[in-house]
Every structure is written in C-alpha cells, then in structure tokens.
Image (cartoon, rainbow, N blue to C red):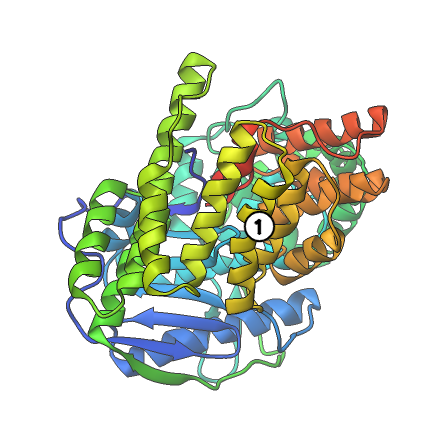
Amino acid sequence: MKKYFVALVAILSTVCAGPAFAQEEWKRAESAHFTVYSDADEVVLVDYTKRLEKFDGLLRFWFDKPTRPAEQKLTVYLLDHSRNVGKLLGSRRVAGFYMANAEASFAVAPRDRGKMDGQHILFHEYAHHFMYRHFSAPVPAWLREGFAEFLGTVEFSDDGRWTYGALAEHRSWELRRNKDIEIQKLIGWPRKESPYVISGFYGWSWALTHMLYMDEDRGARIGYYLDRLSAGEDSLEAAEAVFGNLEHLERRLERYVNKKMEYAVSSDPFAWSDEVAVSSVDPERARMIELTLRRRAGHEREDTRDDLLAYAETGPRPAEALAEAAMTELDIESSERWKYKKKHDDAMGTPYFVEAEALADRALAIDPANYRANIVKGRILSRRLVESHNTDAAAWKAARWYFQMANRTNPTNVEALFRFARSYVYEGREGEMMHDAYIAAFQSAPQVTQYRIWLAYDFARLGDYDTALGLVRPLSSDPHYPKLGRKVVERIEAMRASGARFPQLDYDDEYEGEEADE
C-alpha cells in the first residue's frame, strides 16, 4: 500500500541492523498531553516530556487554543539514536516521523543531538499534529511545512524566556542550492498542472513562513489569508489580496534570505502543565511495544510477522501478539492485492486473507474480547463483502458484530465505532446513529484523514454539501496527498449533482485514507 508519513529529512549515518529498541530498561512518562516511551535516564525522559508540554502550552497560547482535559494524548517513542528511527521506515534519511490513522496517532524521534537534535525533530512533528488537530482552514502546502519548520527551532530558557525564529540550518543549506523561488508555484502548489514538488519547496516554504511570522504584525496576515481560503478563494488570488503583488513578494523574500535572518525573544508568560509521572515498563511489555511500533511503521512486514508469531509462542501475551500478527498479515496481502490490481486492472482471485483470518481466530480463541483481534476480524469480513459487492444483510451483520465486540471492550476508542458506522455505506443502506458516530470519531481525532473524509461523505448524504466540501478541501492542498483530496471533492460534487445518498466507491476504498495517513 502507499505509505504516507510526515518526515523530517536529514542526511544520517548508515542504518545498522538490530532492534530499534535498545536492550535497556524502558520507561513510560505520562503528562497532560503526552505518553512518552523511552529507555532514557529518568531525568532525561522527564526533561523531554516537560519540554513537549511547554511547547504545547506555547502553541495554545500563541494560537489561542484551549486545553481540553479529555483530549487524546499523543504517544511519542523517543529512541536512542536517529539511525534506529530511520530503520523503522527502512530509510537512512528519516530522522523523525509522525503517523495518524484510525488506529493511532504517534510520533517517533531520537534523543541524540547530531546534525539535527531530538528536540527540533519532536517540535517539528508535534507542530504538524497540532495543526492537523486545531486548524480547520484549508492550510496550503507551503504553510503546512513552513509552519512546522519555523516552530521546530523554538527554545526555552530557565529564566522563563523563549525564542522563536532561529535559523533552520538544513533549510538554509537547501536555499543556497535552490536559489530560484518560483513564488507562484510555491504558493499555488499542488495544482493539477504542477503535481510534483518544486525544487527547494521545503526551504522556501520555511523562509516565506519565517518572513511573515517575523513581520511586525507577527503573522496576522497569515490569519487573513487562511480566512479567504476558508471562504473558497483560490490560493494565488488570496495571497495577492493579502500579501500584495506576488512579484514584489518574491523580490522581498529574496532580499530577506540574503540578509542575516533574525530570531525573536519573548518573556510573555503562558500556561503549561509540568506534572510528569514515570513508571517502568516490564521487559516483555517493552518487546510487545517494539513489535507493534514496527508493524505500524510498515517496514519489513514479513520479518515483523515472524517475530510476532515467535513472541506468541513464548511471551506472556499470546493473544495480543497473534492479533498484531493478523494485522501484519492483512497489510501484507492488502499490499499484494493493491499492486496486482494496479498492474492488471483487476482484482486477485479468492480465497484471500485466509492466513490473516486464521491468526485473528487464534487470538480470539485465547481472548474473545481482544480489541485488535476483533477489529482485524471485522475488517477482513468487511473487505471480502466489499470486494464481492455482497449486500447480504446477514453477512454484514456478522461482520459488524466484531466491531461491536471491540467497542464493548474499549468504548472510549472511536475506531470500532467508526468502522461500524462505515460498514453500512458499503452494505448500501443507512444505519442508525451513523452521523453521530462519524462526528464522535472526527471530534476525537480531527488529524485522522479517514475520519474527515467519511464525515464529509455523511454530510453529503444528509444534503449538506457545503459543509462536506469545507471538510475535505484542505486535503486538496496537502503536500502529501492532493490527489486523494481532489478525488473526494469530485465524489461529493457528483453526489450533489445526482442526489445519490452514498459516494461511488470500489473495493480499494475500504482503505481510503489509511494509505494517506499512515
């Protein structure tokens, strides 16, 4: 399957073999907004967690976003070295990444202070998470990446002062290599006629964001710009109206990067939580956490599946390991089927997902209430019904039963509720409380693309096409999946034109949004 991750890229040393988790004692830090796993010394772990909380408080203060006690915490894996971060994705160039899908949202970063230190990476990734959760406007590609880079260099002093706008060295290096701004392409990307990232896109995005936030109005015009985008105005037209003539803006930006770019220091107080509770993680539990992280990252799936099966034979959590192995096997075969369909424009034959289902059944035989095993079993049965265009009510009821079981096991996790509601669309009928389920999922995790897409489809089902399009237009300007955004917009427009209650889908769309979000 296609993979999406927001990755901070840096030239790193060769990725070495061995587990991503060092054979040290793992600890878990709990704070108001984060759960952080690391094998770091407790003092180091607490320090990193407090800095994350302080950064969260600064962002809420700066962008006037309230703290909600019931808000889902972001899980962070703080590894010992950047090479172990990269190994999770099979890349020498990835220093940190963030993933958000129906299953979970999490970030992975190193704590070493190499060419790019762990704090910069953590702040960069959390800035993405914060924007996806709290900004409802269709934020354009250049601002999404520039925002994370600009905020990634925030520093806090012991005397209460904080600095922002410090130089991002790797981006200034990028600017020196790509001196042609192409301001219209930068602000207007992505567009159908220009689908590929322009040279120096990330560097110039950072520079433009830096210049606008360091202006006297401290980024107020960015807010006006986003307001115009929310009203449906074209990105280039909105930029011209707010920032002035684009040729003049380009020349101004050239002058800005050729002089010494300054940073700002503030002592404005802001609220943040400094309470951190640290506990030790049992070694067997730490191994399960590592295997789950490897499975979610998606690299070397066959090896991960085999390691999970070995753990199921010897470890104290066989049902959990078998459920994770079933998820891995489902991902493996889904990828094979997706590749086959792209090459042959046809679906692979049946039977399929047999091994994944067998693993899920083994997990459920040990623990019938296992959350992940029920989810994967329901997904397998649903996928078969979708691919065969089966609308048999009894078969769909049987598939939905597993989502109901998962919801009973963990009623605070909205994934099962979301998948339960969505199954009615594939069956071709309207179910009770569908809209409430989509609303609950989106409010719980607005950063998850799947939840945004399917809530939009449901608004269209109810005839509220403007709200539906407002939800998904931001995807069309996302730097990583603009094609997905345009496809969803086109489907909703088609629903408006035809009066159809459901979007026109095919079997691949059981995974729609998962590929983009992972």
The answer to whether one can see residue 423 in this image is: yes
515 or 329, which is in the foreground? 329
Question: Which quadrant of the figure contains the C terminus?
Answer: top left
Q: Position of residue 370 (x, y in %)?
A: 41, 63
- Quadrant position of residue 264: bottom right
* Residue occupying image coordinates x 18% and y 46%: 15
Would residue 95 be seen by someone viewing this image from the given angle? no
Q: Circle 1 sits in a helix, a strand or a loop, which is it? A: helix
What is the quadrant of the N terminus in the image? top left
**Residue ID at (68%, 27%):** 504
Q: Residue at x 50, y 44 (%)?
A: 517
Q: Could you say where residue 222 lies in the image, as x and y percent from the top left? A: 71, 50
Q: Amino acid at mark 1?
A: Arg
Residue 392 lies, in percent from the top left, at 62, 35
Judging depth in this view, the residue of 61 and 203 nearest the camera is: 61
Is 460 situated above or below 370? above
Front-lying residue, 158 or 395: 395
- Counting labels gives 1
Q: Residue furthest top?
A: 344
Within-10-Å neighbours for mark 1: few <14, some 14–19, many 20+: many
Residue under pointer 1: 400
Which residue is pictured at 57% across the width and 50% down the height? 400
**Lateral position of residue 38 relative to residue 49, left or right:** left
- Coordinates of residue 330 in the picture (x, y in percent): 37, 41
Q: Is residue 497 left or right of residue 155?
A: right
Considering only vertical position in the picture, is 320 above or below 182?
below
Viewer-proximal residue among 44 and 146: 44
Indicate left or right for 49 with 363 as reference: right
